[in-house]
Image (cartoon, helix red, strand yellow):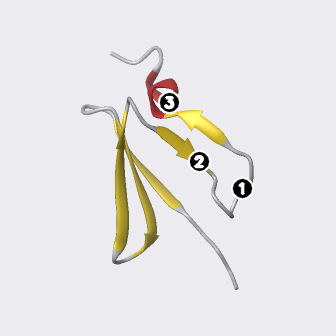
Amino acid sequence: MHSSIVLGTGVLVKSVTVYRALDKIQVLTAQDTLTGESVIPGFQCQVADFFVGLK
């Protein structure tokens, strides 16, 4: 089985949108942790870290 995750960022609202399928979408905010699930096992990153240094 092929796994994939597509990420989109919202700089103004500091969010990350995770697309696992067209009908399986999750919006993560700065307080959340993004994980790699089965695509990148062990990967974890605070969503807020994507926006460090941005105004």
Q: Residues within 10 Å of mark 3 (few under 14, many from 20)?
A: some
Estimate how packed mark 2 is, as few (under 14), some (14 to 19) or many (20 or more) residues with alpha carbons within 10 Å. Answer: some
x, y percent for residue 2: 68, 81
Q: Is residue 5 above or below residue 11?
A: below
Which of the two residues, 34 or 5, is positioned nearer the viewer here?
A: 34
Local crowd at mark 1 within 10 Å, few (<14), some, or many (≥20)?
Answer: few
Tell me if 33 is positioned left or right of 40 in this view: left
Q: Quadrant of the C terminus?
A: top left
In the rendered structure, find residue 50 and report the number of the disc placed on it.
3
> Where, by quadrant of the figure, is residue 37 drawn?
bottom right
Q: Earlier in the sequence, mark 2 or mark 1?
A: 2
Please report the residue visible at 33 percent of the width from the left and 32 percent of the height from the top: 14
- Residue that mark 2 sits on: 35
Amino acid at pointer 2: Thr
Q: Earlier in the sequence, mark 2 or mark 3?
A: 2
Mark 2 vs mark 1, CA separation in Å: 8 Å
Residue 28 location (% of width, % of height): 37, 44
Question: In the rendered image, which residue does mark 1 sit on?
Answer: 40
